[in-house]
Amino acid sequence: MRYKLLVVIASMLLYTKSSLAQHQRDEYLNRISIIESNINKYFFVKIKGLYLENIGEHEKPYSYLWPLCALIQATNESEAVGRKQVMKPVIAAINQYYTTESPSPSYQSYITKSSRFYDDNQWIAIAYLDAYNRNKNPFYLAKAKEIYSWLLTGYDEKLGGGLYWRKDEKTSKNSCSNGPNVLVSLQLYQITKQKKYLDTALLVYHWTNKMLRSPEGIFYDAIDVKNAKIDSATYTYNTGTMLQANVILYQITKDKKYLSEAKFIANNAEKHFYKNNKLGDHYWFNVVLLRGYLELLKVENDANRLSFLVNEGERIWKEERDENNLLGKQKNKSLIMQAAMLEYYARLAQLK
């Protein structure tokens, strides 16, 4: 009798836990629907197939490329939870930033002739490779390979290696243009098994650790090429890319030093960035950090690490959402902040 009672209680607890998890997933899916609707309502200029950068005053008539780098990743994650064809208009918009100018094709920062940033192109490649892994559409792999070829033109041996931040002003080498380069290269290696991609990943990985990693595993923003001065500002996304890179390197090589480094970074990143029960104000920087923790979850299976990131998502929805369900503390709500939280909730909705 007692055994049967324990079985019943255990079954009830499991059912309750499962019901709560489904309720939370449904809540995330509802938020995804609301954010997508707002992006289409407030930011998408259908007649042009382009997006606004923010609501209110604009520096340019249409968005720079960077917010679309956030939106293409967000819509990929949205498709991963069942939304249909939401990447399509974003890809069409990104195509309007495409240039075939020397040294090789890539995407410029605006729809007219403008600077080209290595990190902008890396974020697009990462999103396309994630999409390829999901649906095996050859378009995504071909574009990622094309971007990779252009990225190599941003590498030289000044300061011992590393990639520049932007093509037309090669004054600094940044974590934001090296960490994502490691990820692009690793993803291409995982798909193709071509050694050149792994070689590139390791080359840039070692340089980034040597030049831009702090003793606590947090990554500095940049190094000045002229005088080797470090810009010691720290942002969540720079640490997030290198956290994710270490996990993927462990997945590829099975070398536990990479897993140990990933855990070290994860332990210290929470301490470094999560202050007074919140992260910094830039949602997109923070969702890139979330990507790193989710990658670690795949091999470590410790969901407790995600608690502060889950809590942050809840705090933002509760405290930093206006009467129109637009997200962000700034008066003129921005596309990149909406895209970041779209990705944030879509990624959390995929958790088992």
Image: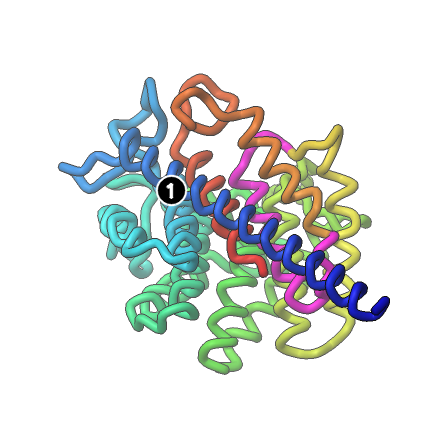
Q: Residue at x 38, y 37 (%)?
A: 34
Q: Is residue 289 magenta?
A: yes
Give whichever of 106, 343 is nearer the camera: 343
**Relative to 153, 48 lies left or right:** left
**Majority SS type along the magenta span:** helix
The part of the image, by quadrant, that contains residue 332 is: top left
Which portion, as a residue range, is magenta? Answer: 280-304
Name the outermost residue toward the front: 1
Give whichever of 238, 16 is nearer the camera: 16
Q: Is residue 86 magenta?
A: no
Q: Is residue 293 visible?
A: no
Residue 335 coordinates in the image, percent (x, y): 38, 34
Q: Residue at x 35, y 42 (%)?
A: 65
Give whichever of 34, 63 is nearer the camera: 34
Picture layout, residue 254 above or below residue 316: below
Residue 111 coordinates in the image, percent (x, y): 25, 41
Residue 73 coordinates in the image, percent (x, y): 42, 52
The part of the image, by quadrant, that contains residue 67 is: top left
Q: Residue at x 46, y 77 (%)?
A: 191
Name the outermost residue toward the right: 2
**Quadrant, the C terminus:** bottom right
According to the picture, the residue beneath numbered tag 1 turns out to be 33
What's the residue type where badge 1 is placed? Ser
Residue 248 coordinates in the image, percent (x, y): 62, 68
**Relative to 194, 210 lies left or right:** right
**Quadrant, the N terminus:** bottom right
Q: Secondary structure at mark 1?
A: helix
Pointer 1 local density, CA inside 10 Å: few below 14, some 14–19, many at least 20:
some
Q: How is the image coloured?
A: rainbow
